[in-house]
Image (cartoon, rainbow, N blue to C red):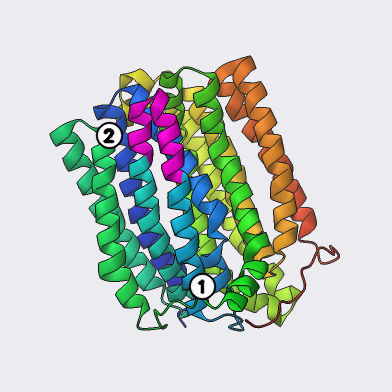
Amino acid sequence: MNSIRSDLGWSLLGQGTFLLAQAGLVVALARLAPLEDVGRYGIAVSLASITFLAVGLGLRMGLATDAEGRARFGVYLGLRGLTTVAALAVMAVAALALGLRDPALGAILVMVALARGADALSDLSYGAFQSAGRMDSVARSLALRGLAGLSAFVAVILASGSVALAVAGQAVAWAAVALGHDLPQAARFVRLRPDFTRTRLVALLRETRALGLAMLLGEIGTAAPRLIVGALLPLALAGIYTAVGYVLVLGTAFAAALSQAMAMRLARANREGQGAFGRMLARFAGGLAALGCAALVIAALFGGPLLNLVFGPGFAAETRLLTLMAGVLALRLPIAALQTGLVAQRRFACLAGLRFGVMLAILSGAVAGAQIAGLEGVALALLIVSSAQLALLIALLRPTTSCLSKEPARV
């Protein structure tokens, strides 16, 4: 297995390339499409993220932290195939329903769903790579997906002016990487034969459902504010929130990538004892907290010029919104590290309970904030909730806390 520094280095390279490509996509969208279409894209991505995580069951993280090999990869693959088909069906129904009122939104939603379907294949492959200690394979895939998806998106939107067709181009690029790189590479470490044995699927479902619920609740907390803005405020404001708030999406995804790279390390440290686990987790959370504080300072000092440079003059007045979002990010980075600590201890139910409370607080806070102070009110609500979440996580990770899950049986 590679060293921690090597794993984190590959994660930074791969996820950094992917996130920069995704940022380029949002910049291209903001500059080449109407604000209303930017808002539609944000709504579609939010709905797709919630839907796919609702049925995704956190299988990648479950596979990556399964240090004892409780379930075979084929069982994970079989369950992921079934849940992906279910998610695509749900998204098709949602696209038809929303398309009756807004055909453009329905079309974008269909294409985003197809892209997420391709992502689901790559995601489980990453779990196999992580279990084998091959973060370099994850990094190569992320770089390929990011650059290919961005190139296809920009080329199509320049040629057609259609956001839906541009997302379709991205979906094709992602599917090509999943089928041409990820699955063949995963076959070096695991057997790519899905196992649909009912008893094994049910056993894995029971083990991972709490983790899946926790990840779903976390995604709702991230995506729901965009949906609330789209429902309560003009679609153009939803476009502004999608573009400016992407700093939070990028930062959270960056932290998630590092967390996934550290998950197996933390799980093994936890088996060695609380001392080794606590020291590793403290270093990880402290490093992310420092990065978050640096981002907050940059946003506060240079937010206006940065927004003008990246998105254009129409966004330069949103400095306060950007600063508030950077403040939320400064809290969510160490939150991501501490939540990975709970996952490494396989305290899935504990994490799910925390995220359920956080989700309720975000939903109520975002609704109230949008009605009282618009976009900045939503961001302020996220800041308050994230502060409380960080404090609760610190308390939960004390050795005396007792919401530990039982070790599940081998499946």
Q: Of label 1 and label 2, which has the lower sequence position?
A: 1
Q: Which residue is mark 2?
A: 163
Q: Position of residue 29 (x, y in %)?
A: 30, 33
Q: Which residue is mark 1?
A: 76
Q: Residue at x 75, y 74 (%)?
A: 274
Around disc 2, counting alpha carbons within 10 Å, would you say few (fewer than 14), some (14 to 19), or many (20 or more)?
many
Q: Position of residue 265 (x, y in %)?
A: 58, 74
Q: Which mark is residue 201?
A: none
In this view, 220 is above or below 118: above
In this view, 293 is above or below 146: above
Question: Is residue 357 found left or right of 152 in the rendered image?
Answer: right
Question: Is residue 335 found left or right of 53 in the rendered image?
Answer: right
Around disc 1, counting alpha carbons within 10 Å, would you say few (fewer than 14), some (14 to 19), or many (20 or more)?
many
Read off the magenta span: 91-109
Which image quarter holds the C terminus?
A: bottom right
Viewer-side residue, 331 vs 180: 180
Specify the amino acid type for callout 1: Tyr
Specify the amino acid type for callout 2: Val
- Which secondary structure class fits the magenta region best? helix
Question: Label 1's element?
Answer: helix
Question: Is residue 283 found left or right of 98 in the rendered image?
Answer: right
Q: Is residue 167 visible?
A: yes
Q: Residue at x 30, y 76 (%)?
A: 184
Is residue 97 covered in magenta? Answer: yes
Q: Residue at x 43, y 63 (%)?
A: 123
Q: Position of residue 340 (x, y in %)?
A: 62, 61
Question: Is residue 309 found left or right of 215 in the rendered image?
Answer: left
In this view, 399 is above or below 19: below
Are circles 1 and 2 on residues that touch, CB within 8 Å? no
In this view, 21 is above or below 327: below
Where residue 106 sits, quadrant-wise, is top left
Question: Label 2's element?
Answer: helix
